[in-house]
Amino acid sequence: MPAATLEVAGLSAGYGQTHVLEDVSFTVPAGGRLSILGRNGMGKTTLMASLMGLTRRYAGSVNVGGSDITALGTAARARSGLGFVPQTREIFKGLTVEENLFTGLKNRPRQAIEEAYALFPRLHERRRNLGSQLSGGEQQMLATARTILGQPSILLLDEPLEGLAPVICDMLMEAFTRLADSGAMTILFVEQRLDSALTFAEDVIILERGRIVWSGKPPALRSDAAVLERYVGVGGLH
Amino acid sequence: MAEATIRSAAASRPGPLLRDLLGLGLIALGGLAGYLLFPDNLAFLTRLISVALLVLSLDLIVGYCGIASLGQAALYGAGAYTAGIACLNGVTEPFLLVLIGAAAGAMTGLLMGAVMLRAHGLPQLVLSIALVQLLHEAANKASWLTGGSDGLSGMVPAPLFGVFEFDLWGRSAYLFGLGLLLVVFAVLRLVVRSPFGMLCRGLKEDPLRISALGIYAFPVLLKMFVISGAVAGTGGALAAIATQVVGLDSVSFELSANALVMLVLGGIGHLYGALVGTVIFMALEHVVAAANPFHWMTLVGAVLIAIVLFAPRGLSGSLDQLAGLLTRQGGRAGR
């Protein structure tokens, strides 16, 4: 599936009666890279979950490649091109690495998992290990690779670097950059590591209490210490 | 260091294909040993194989998909009755009868799955019981077709390959059953190791995760129900061919419950567990019931309680765990 445009218009969503997102609107062009920033609890993960249809929607719409997917369920959204790598990774711990990858193949041949091994050679070394035997970084590689195998047109990465060692973060960022550079997918990147998020992205939005309070280009944000201090909780980047 | 040990243990483990070939070899050896050591009990051993096919079919939906069922005998009985009726109506070729039984089981699996998959958990379990009871009652009432409570009898299957008669000693039936078991087991190993099998296991672990990968659960689970039905139907057809009688017990709640007990005893989600559980349960039943026909279930109950308390993953699961521990310790000792 080629990269697709993502258009979110006036999206309000939450859990039960609790509204978390309020009137969120943005567009990411096909092949674009958007980083989503904000302090903890400001709605970043809820936004990702809402795009996947995992929350309750109160208003607004979501379009993928010009098709309205607002009314679709989670599986149908994934089939329409959304690929989600959740914050909790959610690999199948009772299956081996290779078996986990099989679950992401959809109708592709088994040989397609070589693509995953090419992206993350570490997974090939660990292919017979159970998911429960993997380190956090390897689990993240596996969760990402499994999603990539489904050839999504839009990839949603929710805090993929959380709790990982710097060397693993570098490996993952290199892989994400390779994916983005291939132009095969549009990437939305939620990340607390500001420098990684800004280096990766072409565009940035900041969420504060479920609303977009800033949007623009990474260089503009890097130079705006006041915005960074107020909405992201850091005084500036050097 | 622990990570390196786990990695080396995984790397030193034989590949899945080799393990499956070893497993099939062991089953074949065990089967041939049964043939040579217990020539007077071949009818019992053939029944054991047919029930093993039923328990294997149950493992597919309980162990691999996490679907609760106490109605699996509906699929077994459908295969048995259809093969029996076909035989009485002139279709006597044993392989064709097995195919007919498998098809009937698959069709019943399709219908049963379509109903059961609308519910989850306890309601699903209740639906499975209701379905097997309905089928039992239907078989009882349609006595013009099924023989009702007297059962279906008078089937005379043609000799195997046109040569080997299904005689009183049960040699042909037993070897035929053993061959069927090996073929079915090999196919099922391929199924559960395929991407489809992994999806089923993923659905059992967390349906939402599978949904987020763009997979609809219903058709995947329904497909497994159909495969399960075909396997159970094969078991039923084998029983019909071997015993040349099909009774209401083949479509009973009691047989369904016993199959679940056998599966828990052997360990769910292994396929091997289904075989181990069937052999132990039926051997206990055979030996202890002969010694004490009134209290044999007490012993079976005690064994089951012990298994559930001390080996909750079943016998094969516990053996697997033990082998894993030994492999890891061997890895450490080797370092």
Image: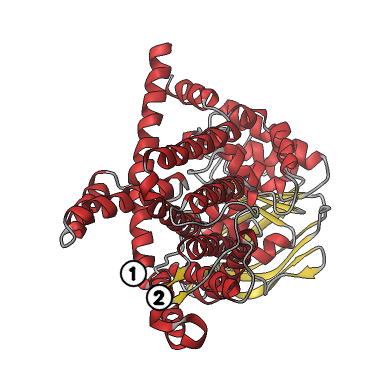
Question: What is the chain identity of the residue bearing mark 2?
Answer: B
According to the image, label 1 marks what residue?
B254
Q: Which mark is residue A23?
A: none
Res A90 visible:
no
* Quarter of the view holding residue A140: top right
According to the image, label 2 marks what residue?
B248
In the rendered image, residue A157, in percent from the top left (x then y), is placed at 64, 48
Q: CA distance from mark 1 to mark 2?
A: 11 Å
- Label whose residue precedes the other's in the sequence (1 or 2): 2
Amino acid under disc 2 = Leu
Rendered residue at 41%/41% (across/down): B34
In the rendered image, residue A64, in percent from the top left (x then y), is placed at 77, 63
Rendered residue at 42%/67% (across/down): B69
In the rendered image, residue A118, in percent from the top left (x then y), is placed at 73, 32
Q: Secondary structure at mark 1?
A: helix
Picture layout, residue A152 above or below residue B84:
above
Q: Are marks 1 and 2 in contact (CB under 8 Å)?
A: no
In the image, B73: left or right of A219? left
Res B314 visible:
yes
